[in-house]
Structure formats: C-alpha cells, structure tokens
C-alpha cells in the first residue's frame, strides 16, 4: 500500500500493480536469470518485449498500418528540433502557441526557418486554448504544430484544430492514452512517457509513413532522422529497454481496465471531484478557464502565494505530495494521470476542505 498520493506532473504516479509485477521480475525475467535491464537489446527476448508493446499500442489506439511507431530518446524537448529538421522542407511552419511547452517548441523551430504564429492565447497568460476554427496559416508552410494538453497551465484542446488540409504535428505528452483519439487526424503524434506510461527517458512517436524520408534539412545528424529509426525498427542504437518494458505493462493494465473509453470515463470522474470542489470553494480557485480545463492537470491557487506555500507544506505532511505549481505561473497543481486512483483525489479534496476551514477559523 502506498504511503503517499503523488500528484506530480512528471515523472508521475504509475499503476501499483505494474510496479509490483516489475518488482517480482526484477532479478529474473521469464526464467532468463537476468533483469530486463541486463538483457541485450539484440536478443530474441527483448525483441518479443518491444514487438508486443508496439502491437498492443497499435491495438489500444487503433493505429492505422500507414503509421510508424518509433521508440526514441532525448525527451519531448528533442522533438522540438527533430520535427523541423525532418519536416520543414520549405523552411516554413505554423505553430499554435497554447502554453509554455508549445512556446518552447516554437522558439526552437525558429532556428530552422520562418515560423508563423497561427493562433495564441499568450495574451491571457495561457488560461485558455486559443480559437483554432479559422487559423491564420502560411500557404507555404509544411505543417501545423500544437501541444494538446498544457501540463503547466492546466488547459486542453477539446477538438482538432481546423487544419485546412495541412498536416498537424501534436505533442500529447501529458494526455497520452488518457482517452480515445483518431490517429488519422494527425501527421504525427508524440509524447514523453513519464506522465502516463512509464519512467522518464523514452519518447513514443507515431508518424505517418509518407512523412518519413531522407529529404531532411541539410546537416541533420543521423540520430535525428526519423528514417534512421524507422529503417531499424527503433533499434539503430541501444534503446531505453527497461522503459519500453514498463510501457508494455502499463498498456496491458489499461487494456485490462477496458481500454481508452473506460480510461476517459475514469479520468473525467476523478477530475470532476476536484473541479466541483474548486467551483464551490471560497479559498481555492481554478486558474484555467472552464471551457479549456484539462482533465489531466488541474491548476489552482489560494488567495496568496504565502498561503499556497503553507498548503504545499501541510499537504506533504498529510501524505499528499507534489502539489506545488510550476515556477512559470506559481500556485498549485494536481496531476490526475491514469494511475492516480479516485481515492487519492478524494483525499486531496478532503484535505483542501480541512485547510480551508482552518484558514477561515484562524481569521476569526
């Protein structure tokens, strides 16, 4: 039984059953006498792990055959460079600036070409998703970039932007496998796995095959070419083998619960517990505008930074950890990823009610 409820934005909580199963196999995986961390990535035993993980991911997400699934390294931040290196044939792209990480990607892409801001919500400090029904697109751009869920600001796209026929590249790091999605709406989906799927150090990229080619920007290193990894089935060099193994177990766990439709239902139920309280509280208030709220990352604050700090300290003393907001906006944040049980959210709300009651009693 866990001693704390971990609301970290990532690395984040993992299913307890997965961790126990991995612990049981730590010293001896399937009678090999070795840990998965010790098995060669060229062995038949590891090949069975990576093949099964990909197959189950394809089944879970209903990934079409004309998409590659790549297991990559470097974190989501390396994709900020790899994407323009591989896709920006005309040295032009459109970026939707909906938060901290989308802006980071935009700034990196500017190193490689002319970047058009198709839409932005920076004017309201990213408290909402910008209107993407009629994007201001560059007619010569190669793709549209978006980040679906803002971990820091607690916002999420509720529908696919109107791409007007252009390819969309979508960072889904903080909402990966949290709900069903139509892969074919995008040219590329990618995400760091440390929020919803496993330990930090692995990125999964799902890329339409026609986008993968040798036609990349001059000077693109071998390791930063998607074709390198596609041609070698994600085994060009030593991949993060243990991470892939854990992802495989998390995917099986999601499938055992009933798949992504069931995951969506459970996640919405959890988020409703916290948002319902925030909407009625006199001390705590949500940061994201209601129509843009994320189910994965709930951002909120009290009436002062000092009170926020006290709340973080006392919450930790009560077994509720990692509720401090990101330094970019301060405040508080509770990440409700797939593996967070509803009991954890209920315990958080109970503590918030106690904290609020004590705060007002102390004023009297």
Image: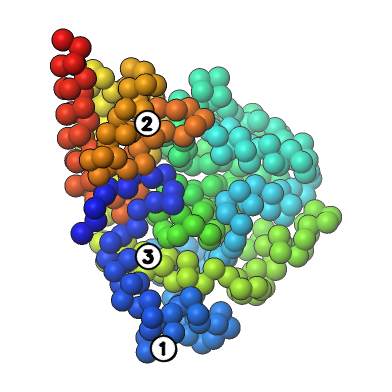
Q: Nearer the viewer, mark 2 or mark 3?
A: 2
Residue 79, percent from left and from top? 63, 51
Q: CA distance from mark 2 to mark 3?
A: 29 Å
**Secondary structure type for disc 1:** loop
Using the image as rendered, state which of residue 105 and residue 145 is in the foreground.
105
- Residue drawn at (19%, 47%), measured in percent from left and top? 343
Mark 2 or 3, nearer chain start: 3
Residue 16, percent from left and from top? 28, 61
Using the image as rendered, state which of residue 32 and residue 49 is in the foreground.
32
Reply above or below: 83 against 22: above
Quarter holding residue 271: top left
- Residue drawn at (29%, 40%), measured in percent from left and top? 316
Q: Quadrant of the C terminus?
A: top left
Relative to 100, is 345 on the left or the right? Answer: left
Residue 213, percent from left and from top? 73, 63
Q: Label 2: which residue?
A: 332
Q: In the rendered image, is residue 280 in sight? A: no
Q: In the rendered image, is residue 221 in sight? A: yes
Q: Label 1: which residue?
A: 33
**Secondary structure type for disc 2:** strand
Q: Label 3: which residue?
A: 251
Mark 2 or 1, nearer chain start: 1
Using the image, tell me which numbered label, if any, was put on residue 18.
none
**Secondary structure type for disc 3:** helix
Q: CA distance from mark 1 to mark 3?
A: 25 Å
Mark 1 or 3, nearer chain start: 1
């Amino acid at each position: 039984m866990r001693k704390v409820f971990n609301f970290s934005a990532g690395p984040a909580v993992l299913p307890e059953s997965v961790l126990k199963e991995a612990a049981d196999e730590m010293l001896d995986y399937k009678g090999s006498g070795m840990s998965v961390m010790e098995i060669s990535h060229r062995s038949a035993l590891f090949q069975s792990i990576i093949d099964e993980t990909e197959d189950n991911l394809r089944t879970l997400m209903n990934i079409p055959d004309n998409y590659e699934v790549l297991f990559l390294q470097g974190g989501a931040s390396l994709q900020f460079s790899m994407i323009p290196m591989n896709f920006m044939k005309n040295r032009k792209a459109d970026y939707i600036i909906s938060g901290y990480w989308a802006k980071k990607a935009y700034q990196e892409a500017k190193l490689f070409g002319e970047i058009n801001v198709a839409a932005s919500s920076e004017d309201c400090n990213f408290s909402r998703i910008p209107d993407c029904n009629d994007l201001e697109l560059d007619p010569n751009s190669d793709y549209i970039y978006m980040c679906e869920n803002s971990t820091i600001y607690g916002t999420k796209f509720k529908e696919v932007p109107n791409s007007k026929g252009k390819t969309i590249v979508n960072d889904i790091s903080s909402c990966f496998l949290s709900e069903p999605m139509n892969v074919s709406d995008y040219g590329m989906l990618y995400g760091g796995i440390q929020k919803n799927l496993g330990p930090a150090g692995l990125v999964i990229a799902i890329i339409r095959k026609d986008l993968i080619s040798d036609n990349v920007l001059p000077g693109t290193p071998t390791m930063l070419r998607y074709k390198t990894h596609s041609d070698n089935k994600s085994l060009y060099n030593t991949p993060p083998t243990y991470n892939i193994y854990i992802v495989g177990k998390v995917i099986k766990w999601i499938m055992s619960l009933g798949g992504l439709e069931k995951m969506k239902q459970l996640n919405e139920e959890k988020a409703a517990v916290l948002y319902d309280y925030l909407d009625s509280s006199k001390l705590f208030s949500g940061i994201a505008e209601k129509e843009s709220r994320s189910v994965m990352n709930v951002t909120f604050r009290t009436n002062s930074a000092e009170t926020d700090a006290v709340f973080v300290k006392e919450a930790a003393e009560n077994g509720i950890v990692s509720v401090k907001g990101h330094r970019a906006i301060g405040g508080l944040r509770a990440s409700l990823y797939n593996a967070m049980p509803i009991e954890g959210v209920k315990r958080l709300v109970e503590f918030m009610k106690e904290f609020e009651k004590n705060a007002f009693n102390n004023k009297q």
